[in-house]
């Protein structure tokens, strides 16, 4: 599985509407064959930073994502909305998705 984490620091005037702005990109990516997950979160430390966690079944699925029209469209408009170059971690990991955390379970 290809696991990717990306930090997007958004220009302050766009941070409140970022999730709505990436809605089409998000839904199109989630519909891709080979997408395992594509999830946005907002930083608790920086109100203008969003973290994207995404995974693809394998390198081929990841390559198809980068070659897709919705990816190219997002890359065309995003430079006007980010305040700095996004930071990324991109690794291949064993597994097929989220696993249960061994060290913690709900009580009762």
Image (tube, helix red, strand yellow):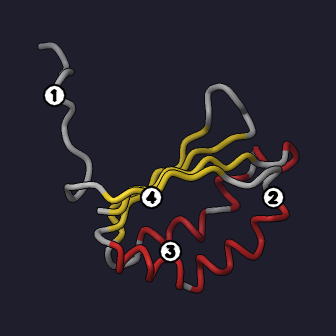
Residue at the extreme top of the image, as rendered? 108
- Residue 39 seen in render: no
Q: Which of the two labelled residues, at mark 1 and mark 2, occupies the earlier sequence position?
A: 2
Numbered mark located on residue 38 in the image:
4
Q: Eyeballing the image, is 68 above or below 90?
A: below
Secondary element under disc 1, as helix, strand or loop, is loop
Residue at x-position 21% and y-position 55%? 94
**Residue 25, x across and y down, in percent:** 58, 70
Which is closer to the viewer, label 1 or label 3?
1
Question: What separation in Å lies between label 4 and label 3 (alpha carbons)?
Answer: 10 Å
**Marked residue nearer the N-terminal end (1 or 4):** 4
SS label for mark 3? helix
**Label annotation for residue 45:** none
- Callout 1–callout 2 Cβ contact below 8 Å: no
Quadrant of the image containing the C terminus: top left
Q: Which mark is residue 28?
A: 3
Category of crowding for the residue at label 1, using alpha-carbon neighbours closer than 10 angstroms: few (below 14), some (14–19), many (at least 20): few
Q: Identify the residue shown where x is 19% and y is 22%.
A: 103
Within 10 Å of disc 4 (Cα), the crowding (few <14, some 14-19, many 20+) is: some
106 over 5 or under it: above or below: above
Report which residue position mark 1 lands on: 102
Q: Residue at x 45, y 56 (%)?
A: 4
Question: Residue 81, labelled with which disc?
Answer: 2
**Alpha carbon distance from label 1 to label 3:** 33 Å
Q: If you read the primary sequence from the N terminus, does the residue marked by circle 4 or circle 3 appear first?
A: 3
Residue at 77% of width from left, 48% of height from top? 10
Report how far apart the C-alphas of labels 2 and 4 lie in the structure: 20 Å
For the residues carrying marks 1 and 4, which lies nearer the camera in this image?
A: 1
């Amino acid at each position: 599985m290809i696991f990717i984490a990306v930090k997007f620091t958004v220009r302050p005037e766009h941070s409140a509407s970022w999730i709505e702005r990436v809605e089409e990109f998000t839904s199109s990516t989630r519909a891709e064959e080979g997408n395992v997950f594509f999830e946005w979160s907002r930083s608790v430390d920086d109100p203008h930073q969003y973290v994207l966690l995404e995974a693809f079944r394998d390198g081929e699925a990841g390559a198809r994502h980068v070659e897709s029209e919705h990816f190219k469209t997002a890359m065309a408009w995003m430079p006007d909305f980010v305040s700095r170059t996004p930071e990324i971690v991109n690794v291949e990991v064993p597994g097929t998705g989220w696993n249960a955390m061994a060290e913690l379970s709900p009580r009762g």
